[in-house]
Amino acid sequence: MKSPVANRWIILSALIFIALNFYFTLDSQWLFNFIPFALIIGFFTIFRMDWALLFVAFSAPLSFNLEYLTDGRLGLFLPTEPILAMLLVLVMAKELYKPFLPRALFSHPIFWAIAFYLFWLFVTSITSTHPVASFKFLLVRLWFFIPILFFGVFLFKDQKNRNRFLWLYIIGMSIVIFYTLLNHAQYGFGEKEGHWVMWPFFKDHTGYGAMVAFIIPLLFGFFFSKKQTPLMQVTLGILITLSLIGLYFSYTRAAWVSIIGAILVLLVIKFKIHFKYLAAIGVIALGVVFVRWDKINMEMARNKSEHTTEEFGERLQSATNVTSDASNLERINRWTSAVEMFKDRPWFGFGPGTYAMEYAPYQDPENLTIISTNFGNMGNAHSEYLGPLAETGWIGAVSVLVLVALIFYHGVSLYIRYPEGETKTMILAMILALVTYFTHGILNNYLDTDKSAVPVWGVVAILIALEIQLNEQEKQKAIS
């Protein structure tokens, strides 16, 4: 039982807060109302780091960007990014005081690929044309990698935590899909309205579509991983149906294509097609494109399919319309600008996070569209691969490609080695989920937001944790 003195302090603190809250509310300082929630979240972040990371998984799809309420002055996702910033400090402090992260993590190739990537971000932040923006970009990357991926490897040694993380993100994302469909239905599922009905949870339909596609393989993985109870079968069936409907009405062509890419990878893995055959097919395909480029270019020029149509087949066909489709033409404009920026500064680039501030002068007048801007204030390079090329030079772009290649190499190797069972099925599902994102990443980039970074790096952490566990089991068997 608390002492009378303690009770008086609690009552006094509550009265002070109520008085201050009343004052600041009258003065339109509405942000003061978030203090109690911030204190509660801060408490659990400090004393239950595992709960904090799992809460981030649930809240990432539901997070809200403060720039909507501050006229763009403060770009911070609530509640996820403050939690991740606290976890960044706590994980580093705890590791320095008493190491707790798995030692095998620090010898894993993916860890070293990430370490080099972060090192190069630091170097190019120093040489950046906008150092403040670049170091801010680096800080955001640090609070994505260290709390989610590094601490995640420690947390995901436990299968329950692995499943909780995936399920919490799926539940959060399912809430967003349901909200979006409900909102969209009021406008007759129109294509134009489909670009913004997911607000305020997602800025536009492309980022939303990418993450809807991401959870679909995970849901199928849970459905087929083991014999589910009738109630769980019905629940998974409802969520799969909801996600497929959400994907269709997202009107995001890149997301649709990413699902096709995942299906092709699934066939490659299931039928155990050897890499040399895939390489041969790739070389032949590139050769055909090179030889027949003029013909292909003429066919694309004849393609007048617009992405504004709501018919599925025509929308997919419009993905190759580079004559009149403004979205495609603007994407080419951004890519061309990125390449021209790279030519200007091939070694160090313009600095992490600077593309939007620098690309305007590099736009070719012939590539400008009705949605282009001379101020260069309309976003990023629309590519997870060309963006780093412009911002961090060829070394930075290669580091990204190496990181992605290592993720899939170790993921597929883990799947091949892992014993049959529930976990093996989920490994395949996670690989396919990553395929959807990194395929989508050719056309868009969202890893600078919590919406995508949390699930993507969380899944990578799960795969690393499983690989470390499997390696330890195999060593023990070899010794015995």
Image (cartoon, helix red, strand yellow):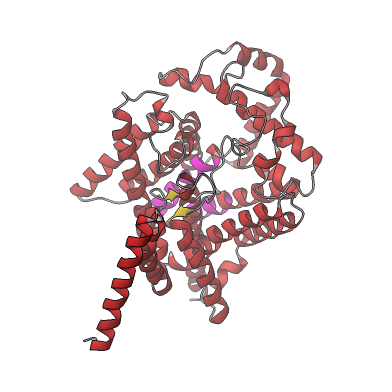
Q: Which residue appears farthest toward the top when viewing the image? A: 302
Figure check: 209 above or below 151: above
Q: Residue drawn 54% across and 78% down?
A: 99
* 337 versus 219 height, above or below: above
Q: Main secondary structure of the magenta part?
A: helix
Q: Is residue 250 left or right of residue 471?
A: left
Residue 374, image x, y percentages: 67, 30
Which corner quadrant holds the N terminus? Answer: bottom left
Location of residue 405 with respect to 23 vertically, above or below: above
Residue 87 magenta-drawn? no
Please state which of residues 82 and 152 is positioned toward the viewer in this rendering.
82
Task: Tell me residue 182's x, y (percent).
Answer: 28, 34
- The residue at the point 44 percent across, 52 percent down is 427
**268 with respect to 79 (left or right):** right
Q: Residue at x 35, y 68 (%)?
A: 40
Q: Is residue 283 left or right of residue 221?
A: right
Above or below for 461 versus 334? below
What residue span does the magenta drawing correspond to? 409-438
Q: Nearer the viewer, residue 131 or 263?
A: 131
Camera-nearest residue between 283 and 399 = 399
Count the numbered circles shown.
Answer: 0
Which of the 4 image quarters holds residue 346? Answer: top right
Residue 145 appears in the picture as rendered = yes
Q: Quadrant of residue 115?
A: bottom right
Determine the image quadrant of residue 26: bottom left
| Residue 67: image location, x then y, percent | 49, 47
Q: What x and y, as percent, mark residue 327? A: 56, 25
Q: Is residue 159 visible?
A: no
